[in-house]
Amino acid sequence: MGLWQKSVKKRKPVKSRKEGAALLIIDWQRFFIDPHSPAFIPETVKVRSRLEALIKLFQETGLPVLASTHSNRADDDNNFLKFYGRVIKRESKWSALAPPLSPLKNLKTFEKETYSAFENPRLCRFLKAHKIKRIVLAGVQTDRCLLASALSGFDRGFEIIVAADVCSSRSKFRHRMALNLMKTSCARVLKLAELERLFRSQATDEEK
């Protein structure tokens, strides 16, 4: 009996595969990123290098990179036009994606007319079809479209992670307040370095 036991190799426990993950970059468009735009957000200059690093992380770990783009019709009854007095007009040069997103190949882009990216049914269908349950959010603006997307994604059953130092707002105070609100209501809030450790360690675990 003892000899038989020695000849049997111990089987490694089967690890449950992590739910699929994706990076969703919110509204990284020339309207907010281009210094010549009337709606330029200066903080995005600092964020860009961290966004490049985050994109590289997802590409290296074989995870999809997605983007939303915001635009609206300039109709008199449009709430965005009523509230802000202007909109990102469709087909305008300001609605285009800005670097480092604009040169990316195979980038899946989802249009929206709302604060939340999850209001686009195409995005939800894509995530469901690819069995993606964990979403990392980055982009602009922390206190508006990122906040709305985090809450909306949470309501739809997704695990939401917000890249705290890879998103920005016009106000550092509102940026911090929005991060705190998301942290206490719907999302994990992690910095780029923490995300790199998390996803690289998971990729290593799955290779074992």
Image: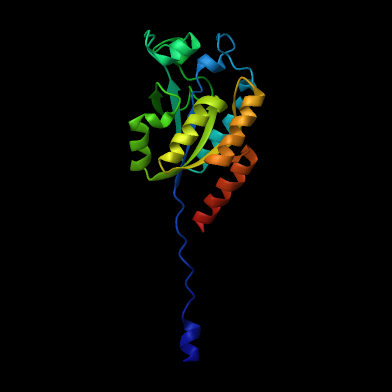
Q: How is the image coloured?
A: rainbow
- Residue ID at (42%, 23%): 114
In the rendered view, does 164 fall on the left or right side of 128? right
- Residue ID at (62%, 30%): 177
Q: Quadrant of residue 110?
A: top left
Q: Quadrant of residue 140?
A: top right
- Residue ID at (48%, 35%): 151
Residue 97 appears anywhere in the view: yes
Residue 64 appears anywhere in the view: no
Q: Residue furthest bottom?
A: 1
Q: Position of residue 50 (x, y in %)?
A: 62, 31
Q: Position of residue 155 (x, y in %)?
A: 43, 40
- Residue ID at (40%, 23%): 112
Q: Is residue 59 above or below residue 34?
A: below
Q: Position of residue 164 (x, y in %)?
A: 61, 34
Q: Position of residue 122 (x, y in %)?
A: 33, 31
Number of numbered discs visible in the structure rendering: 0
Q: Nearer the viewer, residue 66 or 104?
A: 66
